[in-house]
Image (cartoon, rainbow, N blue to C red):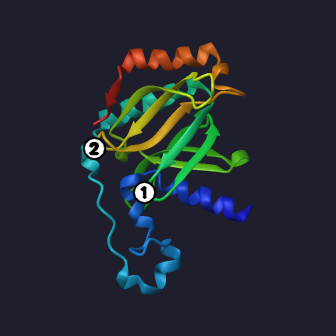
């Protein structure tokens, strides 16, 4: 479905929330539709890339690599206008630099589910571990990793441990991997 693919693509590029306005015209319509009035487009806010050190990027990469142990996740990315969700793993995670400034991104590309995620490393300042309660009648616990922006407040992506049929059927090994990460990093971790 072409419309669905376009929607997922637009939501995926908005993962780097501080840069989301770079893809939108002031009117809120996609930049492609608004390109006729180029003068009316405002400049995107600048991301202070100096906030994340090389050591912080290495720590973030190690952290993201450890998420492979939690298995299937519900990846949720939001901005002021949209929500994108995908069920995936981080098994295909890789790193690459791109764009005019050759900034480094963590990438998950899985054509089988039409997922093409690029998470700007300089845009991730920390992570927070949370538990919640499912919306099902059994109120089972949920296990969440929130990836935070450089301000440590804005959530740029959420990784929910994904169950098969009900929240209660998350494999104990996956919960143990989440708990091991939480024990190692604490309730929150700073990558700056």
What's the mark number on residue 173? none
User: For this rendering, which residue is in front, 3 or 69?
Assistant: 3
Which is closer to the viewer, label 1 or label 2?
1
| Callout 1 touching callout 2 (CB < 8 Å) | no
As drawn, is 3 to the left or to the right of 139? right
* 118 in relation to 142, above or below: below
Instruction: Point out residue 46 in the picture as x, y percentages from the top left corner.
Output: 29, 60
What's the mark number on residue 80? 1
> Residue drawn 53% across and 43% down?
76
Q: In terms of secondary structure, where does tag 2 sit?
A: loop
As drawn, is 3 to the left or to the right of 174? right
Instruction: Point out residue 15 in the picture as x, y percentages from the top left corner.
Output: 47, 51
* 162 in relation to 27, above or below: above
Structural crowding at the residue carrying mark 1, measured as other residues with C-alpha within 10 Å and reported as few (<14), some (14–19) or many (≥20): few
Picture mark count: 2
Q: Return the disc, 1 or 2, that comes first in the chain's sequence.
A: 1
Using the rendered view, name the quadrant where residue 110 is placed.
top right
The Cα atoms of the two marked residues, 1 and 2, are separated by: 16 Å
In the picture of the structure, the residue carrying the numbered disc 2 is: 151
Structural crowding at the residue carrying mark 2, measured as other residues with C-alpha within 10 Å and reported as few (<14), some (14–19) or many (≥20): some
Instruction: Point out residue 148 in the picture as x, y percentages from the top left corner.
Output: 37, 39
Q: In terms of secondary structure, where does tag 1 sit?
A: loop
> Residue drawn 47% across and 56% down?
14
As drawn, is 151 to the left or to the right of 127? left
* 70 in relation to 120, above or below: above
Instruction: Point out residue 94 in the picture as x, y percentages from the top left corner.
Output: 54, 40
As drawn, is 33 to the left or to the right of 44? right
Image quadrant containing the C terminus: top left
> Residue drawn 44% across and 69% down?
24
Image quadrant containing the N terminus: bottom right
């Amino acid at each position: 479905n072409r419309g669905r693919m376009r929607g997922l693509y637009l939501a995926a590029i908005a993962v780097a929330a501080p840069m989301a306005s770079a893809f939108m015209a002031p009117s809120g319509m996609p930049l492609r539709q608004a390109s006729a009035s180029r003068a009316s487009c405002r400049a995107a806010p600048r991301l202070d890339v100096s906030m994340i050190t090389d050591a912080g990027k290495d720590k973030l990469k190690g952290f993201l690599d450890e998420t492979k142990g939690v298995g299937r996740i519900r990846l949720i990315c939001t901005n002021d206008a949209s929500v994108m969700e995908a069920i995936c793993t981080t098994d295909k995670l890789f790193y690459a630099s791109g764009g005019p400034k050759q900034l480094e991104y963590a990438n998950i590309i899985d054509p089988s589910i039409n997922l093409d995620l690029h998470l700007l490393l300089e845009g991730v300042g920390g992570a927070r571990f949370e538990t919640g309660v499912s919306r099902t009648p059994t109120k089972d616990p949920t296990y969440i990793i929130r990836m935070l922006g450089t301000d440590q407040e804005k959530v740029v992506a959420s990784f929910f441990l994904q169950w098969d049929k009900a929240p209660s059927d998350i494999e104990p090994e996956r919960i143990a991997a989440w708990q091991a990460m939480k024990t190692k990093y604490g309730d929150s971790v700073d990558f700056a």
